[in-house]
Amino acid sequence: MADSLSFPETPAARPRESRELLVRAEGIGVRRDGRWLVRNVDFEIRRGEIVTLIGPNGSGKTTTAKTVLGIYACDAGQVRRADGLRIGYVPQRLAIDWSLPLDVRRLMTLTGRFPAPAIEAALAEVGIAHLADAPVQRLSGGEFQRAMLARAIIRKPDLLVLDEPLQGVDFTGEIALYQLIGTIRDRLDCGILLISHDLHIVMAATDHVVCLNGHVCCHGTPQSVAESEEYRALFGSRGAAALAVYRHHHDHAHLPGGRVVPAGSTAEAIDATAGGEACCGHDHGHDHDHGHEPHHGHRHD
Amino acid sequence: MTTGTNRTTGTAMIDEFLLRAFLAGIGVAVVAGPLGCFVVWRRMAYFGDTIAHSALLGVALALLLDWHVMVGVFAVSAAIALALLVLRRVSVLPGDALLGILSHSALAIGLVAVAFLTTVRIDLVGYLFGDILSVGWGDVAMVWIGGAAVLAVLALVWHPLFAATVSEELAAAEGLAPARSRTVFVLLLAAVIAIAMKIVGILLVTSLLIIPAATARRFASGPEVMALIAAGLGALAVASGLAGSLAFDTPSGPSVVVAALALFVASLALGGRTVSAPGSQS
């Protein structure tokens, strides 16, 4: 299923174990207000591979990524990073206040200094060279994500962490951004930790999937995860079967009773309180009339 | 405010008063402008107010221990600022409620503490609203030495501090220690409050931080440019405010603030770079 989508395949010539280990999470857990947000999470990221964290809202994807990044301290376990590991980070939903006079060019040098030609090259690589002098507040969702990506890759990171990089990106932009991420992986030969609850194309581009739900509920190649019992239990068998077929915009959430509510904080809160194994009961058999173009639904048969 | 009695002693004396006032005022404004940009960007106006209000306690401490007033004010303001950073993390109260409690109680405790010092007569109004014309050469030296030190440290931490202002988590992930930048920043804020208190007074100190920075935003294309413009506008506000204070015999501190506000209003009328955008809060 996954191989039918047109994304660069893993440089499969190199077996996984021979690649340089960048980060290893060893039984990490993060606790807030007496509750474990994530617990017993193990995975590793090696040079040149894309590791994708998937899971329902509130499953601890962002918490796990922030722990790997060192933003959060571990309350259990530990994160081992390679010596001198250089990190590029594209956070989720960064809102930049209007009081900040910040254009794209200045954004590029936020955490390091780079010569002007390097900045131009990085912006050209993500396709927004013409926006170098634009205030960041004026960028569209897709343009902003590209600017954030350019900012991260100009550092030539060993590890690139992308937290839901498709926020505010339209459908055609999504395909292009994923292709771009694959290209960046190949050119920089960096490890990529990608977070998404948009499972389908991610799964196609990725080497290794870690499916979270407060703990690692399953992991492996996209194929093996999609076929695993745990994954089907979490996302529903029909959802799993429809995996490579449907491009599904998560602009809504499903309440246990079958009611559909718009996505956003309310929906996330509902998802979070629904909790447990049933918290992402997406029924992909229902009418897909919300928000995505009808013609892209079937990319192959 | 206090010039009336001195006017008869000759023009040389008046000139020297004026010179000291302008030197001290402009020194403070040039430091307050860039730092004020961070106060605006980080939404710390109320935080600045709170540590400014604690300055009177610093005055009392300085008088009690026979320190220079600026040293006492810096010590107390810095202690309150650091305590606030810790309290914000551990308190269950919303940030602004916490600041509201501390801001006014710090001022009240300061007023009570000063009242206890019956052996010393202090010019309370001067501390609250500024008394730039009573500035001595020693004060001018403190302003310029202290101000230079603040600007030097700010230049050193500028890059990580700005990165942390845009996103603390981004700065943390990419190894820029945002917590350290934040601590250095509030200490610089305490230092500016200590050196600015005599110019505009405890109650008006934050205006010198915020108004020039807010005015500069309309003309700035980048953060560094905004800091420079804010410093220039602050100096202009001090110069014109003092001139106005002499011309109309109005209190010096409030006159400086009125001048800063006039520049802000003029910048709105002038236009410049448009700050507002669809969906923006500003």
Image (tube, grey):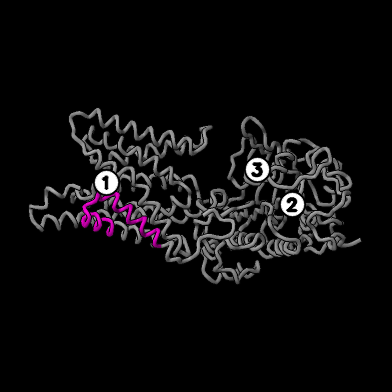
Q: Amino acid at mark 1?
A: Gly
Vertical comparison of A154 with A75: above or below: below
Vertical comparison of B183 with A276: above or below: below
Label ID, residue A63: 3
* Residue B252 is one of the magenta-drawn residues: yes
Q: Give the residues drawn in magenta, as a range.
A: B239-266
Q: Is residue A158 left or right of residue B80?
A: right
Residue located beneath label 1 in the image: B130
Distance from label 2 to label 1 (Cα)?
Answer: 69 Å
- Residue in view at x 73 percent, y 39 percent: A270
N-terminal-most mark, 3 or 2:
2
In percent of width and height, residue A251 lies at 75, 51
Label ID, residue A271: none
Which callout, 1 or 3, points to the residue nearer the camera?
Answer: 1
- Residue in view at x 52 percent, y 33 percent: B93
Depth order, front residue of A11/A38:
A38
Predominant SS along the magenta part: helix
Q: Amino acid at mark 3?
A: Thr
* Residue B160 is one of the magenta-drawn residues: no
